Image (cartoon, rainbow, N blue to C red):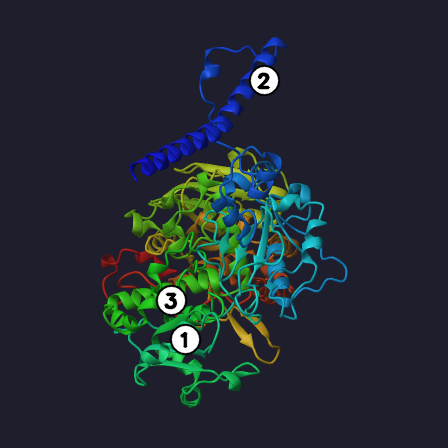
Amino acid sequence: MQAKKRYFILLSAGSCLALLFYFGGLQLRAPRSHSRRDEHSGRDGLHQPGPDRFWPRFPDTLRPYFPWEQSENEDSSVHTSPRQKRDANSSIYKGKKCRMESCFDFTLCKKNGFKVYVYPNQKGEKIAESYQNILAAIEGSRYYTSDPSQACLFVLGLDTLDRDQLSPQYVHNLRSKVQSLHLWNNGRNHLIFNLYSGTWPDYTEDVGFDIGQAMLAKASISTENFRPNFDVSIPLFSKDHPRTGGERGFLKFNTIPPLRKYMLVFKGKRYLTGIGSDTRNALYHVHNGEDVLLLTTCKHGKDWQKHKDSRCDRDNAEYEKYDYREMLHNATFCLVPRGRRLGSFRFLEALQAACVPVMLSNGWELPFSEVINWNQAAVIGDERLLLQIPSTIRSIHQDKILALRQQTQFLWEAYFSSVEKIVLTTLEIIQDRIFKHISRNSLIWNKHPGGLFVLPQYSSYLGDFPYYYANLGLKPPSKFTAVIHAVTPLVSQSQPVLKLLVAAAKSQYCAQIVVLWNCDKPLPAKHRWPATAVPVIVIEGESKVMSSRFLPYDNIITDAVLSLDEDTVLSTTEVDFAFTVWQSFPERIVGYPARSHFWDNSKERWGYTSKWTNDYSMVLTGAAIYHKYYHYLYTQYLPASLKSMVDQLANCEDILMNFLVSAVTKLPPIKVTQKKQYKETMMGQTSRASRWADPDHFAQRQSCMNTFASWFGYMPLIHSQMRLDPVLFKDQVSILRKKYRDIERL
């Protein structure tokens, strides 16, 4: 027995030694062969061996990015583990490890800035209406270029929105069509929009073609497949989603307490089998028929009766009892469970209705999550903890509920109410990645007026914008610059423009006066201008066009601008009072001449009126104060088509400025103390140079109203009946007790 044990031990030891020698020899042969190559290279004079040749060779720690498939073909010596190969092969799309630093060419954006090129539509290719809206939004933006050599970003003209093979909108042979594009370059610097991917039964996120190194702007994207700082998660929107404008949110009044008739609601399909069925099948456990209404129906699809369960008939009957819109508008919280895909139409519907979304879609990368803090507008739930949802939302304090509802309205109107806003938000996020040194911070994205209206190219300091004084603890500016728009030659020392200049210069708040000379005649000599206590700067308008009055001139050194027409009649007291009012409302237009708009039912168009009523929606910039940032926004944000229209008509620039400011602030302008006379009545028909004497002037302004409303997609102007007067204005007290006593004498 002992002999057998010894024999077995010796045999095992011998086998182990043989195996060790065999495998060790395989590993030792490579270094020896490598050493011989080194010596041979040394003899040829290409490499002299030194002491460092005995050190092991380590791979470069900063290897350039290669997709797995590419690296395997190009460098077979690079070791790839089986797990890495498996992950690469199972990837939903290639380039899963792409980031801006590795798959985006920044040099294309340095020369011409952020410009976007849209491929022309190929002959015979059908494009769905939703994708047409996306392309139209890009082509109508300030980033669009028709020259691909100027572009920083490229967008396909081929419809990539619906990649469900069972959909009638599915585009076949997209792989070969994309690869044939001469600018494709493996997708580098390309952006692909997609709403639907995958099909029954698993609904994967495969878009059906190799996107290479392209970025995805994709709905219902999972955190697993989302490439941070590269892809953009967008919301799922219907084909009826408006292209521009869009309806405002439904929160009309900040009622306290903010609770509505129902605490939590949902109404939608219940999937009996397949992906997405688990959560919706369990909703009946939470439904109580009182303030928690979670209604589902299995009555959808062709074969629903074949798969219906014992609850279907009861659920269908309960489902028919309630109107979805009535539930939506009378609920505090709206459940947003996943469907077949992670995203749902319920998400945008809840935002618009000021119904706080309760998210039940594990693994969904929420829309624009890179910039939006969804904890300020939604409740992020867990599908595995469905039964805890009612108690969780009931524990939220009413102050927090009101804040959540207010934030839903801001986010809806800022980023989601139209296809255009969704597209522009996507482009702005990408632009911020490219130009990080001037990118917007979280406060800008998550606070009114939002990232689309706060252009970081203007300034990187929040205090230079009129919206953040309270957040930063800053006081509004204490001085203004008067900008006088001059269009007639200076022939007499008694002209209204000189009297206006003197009155503005006498204001205690005036820092300087800028005269914008848009007259065809040469600039008057210096001695022709009256002597004042503040500097007077005369500059020639660019191209002598009307829009030049709103250019962001470097000569304007103050944040506050007093905009004046040359024939305006204002006293120093009126200027002082208007400026003190503006200091309390620095984001709005504050001034004297008011106008209004109305809807003309007979003509089915917007109308413009100058009638004196208690209602107004515009304050003309012929005598108004506003923040100088609006000069920059007017110049950079508005399209060239609208500014060209203004310049051709030499009219409507004041209306366009009111449209812009109201669109940004969602607030009306502020009118100050009523005057008995204004420039148009004072000038009458006596001045040929006056625009008010032109008989076509009023008709042009009517036309402008409708053109501007069409571009904005809605009517941004807001009516107001508020007028701010000085304290004790018109009161029967001693004039000595009144600060702005001269106003009453006008």
Q: Residue at x 53, y 53 (%)?
A: 90
Q: Nearer the viewer, mark 2 or mark 1?
A: 2
**Which image quadrant for residue 331?**
bottom left
Which x, y percent locates residue 440? 42, 47
Q: Nearer the viewer, residue 205 or 610?
A: 205
- Classify mark 1: helix, strand or loop: helix
Q: Amino acid at mark 2?
A: Arg
Q: Which mark is residue 359?
A: 3
Is 49 above or below relative to 650?
above
Q: Earlier in the sequence, mark 2 or mark 1?
A: 2
Single out the mark in the foreground, 1 or 3: 1
Q: Nearer the viewer, mark 3 or mark 2?
A: 2
x and y percentages locating residue 266 in the rendered image:
39, 77
Residue at image coords 60%, 77%: 604
130 vs 372, left or right, is right
Q: Return the residue nearer the eye: 607 or 332.
A: 332
Would you say 310 lies left or right of 26 here?
A: left
- CA neighbours of label 3 inside 10 A, class few (<14), some (14 to 19), many (20+): many
Where the N terminus falls, by quadrant?
A: top left
- What residue does disc 1 label? 280
Q: Amino acid at mark 3?
A: Met
Q: Quadrant of the C terminus?
A: bottom left
Residue 250 visible at all: no
**Residue at mark 2 to residue at mark 1: CA–CA distance:** 67 Å
Q: Is residue 723 left or right of residue 91?
A: left
CB under 8 Å between discs 3 and 2: no
Q: Secondary structure at mark 3?
A: strand
Please name the amino acid that badge 1 sits on: Arg
Residue corresponding to mark 2? 37
Q: How far across and down, in percent of the image, does residue 574 sit?
A: 38, 55
Which one is earlier in the sequence, the residue at label 3 or at label 2? 2
